Image: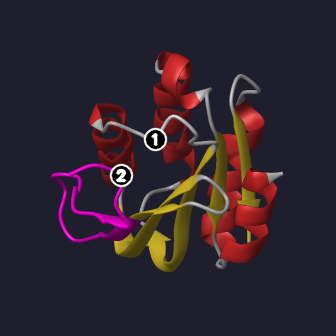
Amino acid sequence: MTLMQDQIEFLPSTKECLASVEFNWKSRAIVGVFQGEVTVDDVLSFWDALMKEDLPPETKGVLLDFSNAKLSFKASGYLRIVDYFVENISFVGRFKIGVVANTPHNIVVLMLIARENFMYELRPFTTRRACLVWIKG
């Protein structure tokens, strides 16, 4: 199944923490909605699965929605994500990465990822709408 459909069925091999993945045609963004406890491996599995997908050529960004999830790793765990992004910059660097979070811990982790390296464009948001507007812009 491909992202050209409204909803796709791929999930990382790491369980149910990924509630849904959709393609938002208006903003041209892939939207991954997470729930419950989310580990670094869950986040990296999402990106691994995304790299294997046949993405629409007009894809501008990736929105990761953690508003109903808890990043269940220490703030220092963010370095694994930064290293992954740098190692896969030819893929990750093609997109604006917007992340929705609404807990202090999640926001701190995302800000650390955003500020660690400027090879990729990542911004935290508190609403999905604001994030989609930024990706579209």
Disc 2 is placed on an element classified as loop
Sequence-wise, the earlier of marks 2 and 1 is: 2
Residue drawn 78% across and 70% down?
130
Range drawn in magenta = 1-21
Residue at the extreme bottom: 68
The residue closer to the viewer here, 18 or 94, is: 94
Residue 127 showing in the rendered view: no
Identify the residue shown where x is 73% and y is 59%.
Answer: 124
Under tag 1, what secondary structure? Answer: loop
Q: Give yes or no for residue 3 being in the magenta stretch.
A: yes
Corner quadrant of residue 20: bottom left
Question: Where does residue 49 sit, x and y in percent of width and height?
Answer: 28, 42
Judging by the rendered image, the residue that carries numbered circle 1 is 56
Q: Is residue 52 left or right of residue 47?
A: left
Q: Are marks 2 and 1 in contact (CB under 8 Å)?
A: yes
Q: Amino acid at mark 2?
A: Leu
Instruction: Measure the C-alpha gap from mark 2 to mark 1.
Output: 7 Å
Task: Check disc 1: other Cα within 10 Å, few if <14, some if 14-19, many if 20+.
Answer: some
Does 96 sit above or below residue 107?
above
Residue in view at x 23 percent, y 58 percent: 11
* 44 lies above or below 75: above
**Residue 86 place in picture, x, y as percent:** 55, 21
* Label drawn at residue 3: 2
Q: Main secondary structure of the magenta part?
A: loop
**Amino acid type at image mark 1:** Pro
The disc placed on residue 48 is none
Q: Quadrant of residue 53?
A: top left
